Amino acid sequence: MSRAPHPSRKTFTRFASRQPFQFGLPNVSADLTQASDNSPIYFTRATSLLRRQVLATAPGVKIKSDSYRFQVLPRDGWGEHDFSNKSVLFLIPDDALGDCVGMALFFRALKQRFAHIRIGVLNSGSASDIFALVPDIEVFQLFVSATRLKSFAHVIDLSEMEGWRDIATMPVNPEEALCEAFGIPPVPLEERQAPTGTGLKIGIVPMASSPLRTLPPKLVSEIAAMLAKQDCDITIVLNAYQGVMKAYKAALGPFSGNSIRVVDGFKTIGNLIKFVGQQDYLIVADSGPAHISKLFQTPGIGIYTSADAKTLQGRHKNLRTWQSSFEGPHCSAPCGLAKLRATVDGKIGCMGSLELPITALPDIPEKGDASLAQSLVTNAPVPCVARLEADIPEICHLISQDFAQA
């Protein structure tokens, strides 16, 4: 038998407001903006943007506590419950796009397994547009009212999933892990035909949230130039929310002809999702769009460096994968790091770039280094990323094979 509910891992802020309010993140679709509902109390993550930048100075708002914890269904009870005709609120551990795609796919499976289950997600943040793709799901982007909270029979904290605490150093596949934890099969995958004909829409998304996973500009430039000869409509999508975007764009250099366009990024994740779904073929780094492609089974190639392609792609075969083959004295790709690490004296990098063992890199950097980040994504990439430049002929050949077969 499962244990009784226990406190959630993360703390939440309880607050009241004497005035109506609404709030939404700038990179989330406007139709997912949240509004107050005359509830006496509201809850938001104690570390959320809403708590840190808005509530403290908002007129009419009174903070009741920053240490509230929901009573959640323990991990050992997830697979024992029949959730048919039940309402379940899931606490989302973070809003990393790839992880949230895996969770959204899991929710599809959960709805398939349990008839008339009602699902809500709290703390979906920037990934709210991803969860909105799941039919009949309630998306609480940043807060939930006490009134709405009472309508849920169960609360589940997904951060209790094994491996979540180590996800920054060893990526996991949330879809497969959660389906196994709940004892349910994943949803069947739709087959999407390989692209054919001329004028195909080709999307290239080379930038990830970490320099460990961003593609070298030279690789991107040569892939685009090759595809331009294939009579394709090529769009290279950067990320305007990242401080290194302008430097990366400059490193790409100019492109000749009218078949290649470079866009700085999309205002919302919803726009990015729409773009991925509309493409005939994708070339992507180990990033959110690589995972978003699973939602549509968009064909293409995923190019991986520090993370293991097999783990992250899982059962999804829509993307062919290329894995960096770097081997050095202190690490070999894929090493498992999702983000840069720091030494005890503050040097930032990875095992390969700093020529140190993982034991000498105990921490995630507390502060970013803009000049270092810019250098790492332009002219001095970490070794597993730099290795991709030597692989350019083979990667281009692999991509050209897809079009030759079409």
Image (spheres, rainbow, N blue to C red):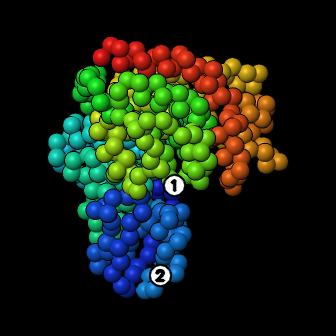
Give the residue pinned by disc 1.
241
Q: Residues within 10 Å of mark 1 (few under 14, many from 20)?
A: few
Please tell me whether residue 15 is drawn above or below residue 26 in the rendered image: below
The residue lying toward the viewer, choosing from 325 and 22, is 325
Q: Residue at x 73, y 21 (%)?
A: 328
Label 2 Cα crowd, 10 Å radius (few <14 / some 14-19 / many 20+):
few
Quadrant location of residue 257?
top left
Check the image and report above or below for 378 versus 154. above
For residue 348, say whether it is visible: yes
- Please name whichever residue, 343 or 245, is drawn nearer the observer in this view of the structure: 245
Tag 1 or tag 2, which sits nearer the N-term? Answer: 2
Q: Is residue 170 visible?
A: no
Question: Which residue type does callout 2 highlight?
Answer: Ala
The residue positioned farthest toward the front in the image shown:
257
SS at mark 1? Answer: loop
Numbered marks: total = 2
Residue at 31% in and 45% down:
274
Q: What's the residue type where badge 1 is placed?
A: Tyr
Which residue does the image show at 34% across and 50% down from the upper left? 271
Q: Judging from the image, what secondary structure is the residue with disc 2 in?
A: loop
- Residue visible at 51% across and 54% down in the picture: 241
Q: Position of residue 264 (x, y in %)?
A: 47, 50
Image quadrant where residue 384 sits = top right
Residue 100 - label? none
Distance in Å between CA atoms under marks 2 and 1: 26 Å
Q: Quadrant of the N terminus?
A: top left
At which x and y percent is residue 137?
A: 25, 52
Q: Which residue is mark 2?
A: 58
Query: Taking 235 as reference, is 250 left or right?
Result: right
Q: Quadrant of the C terminus?
A: top left
Position of 329 with respect to 202 (left or right) is right
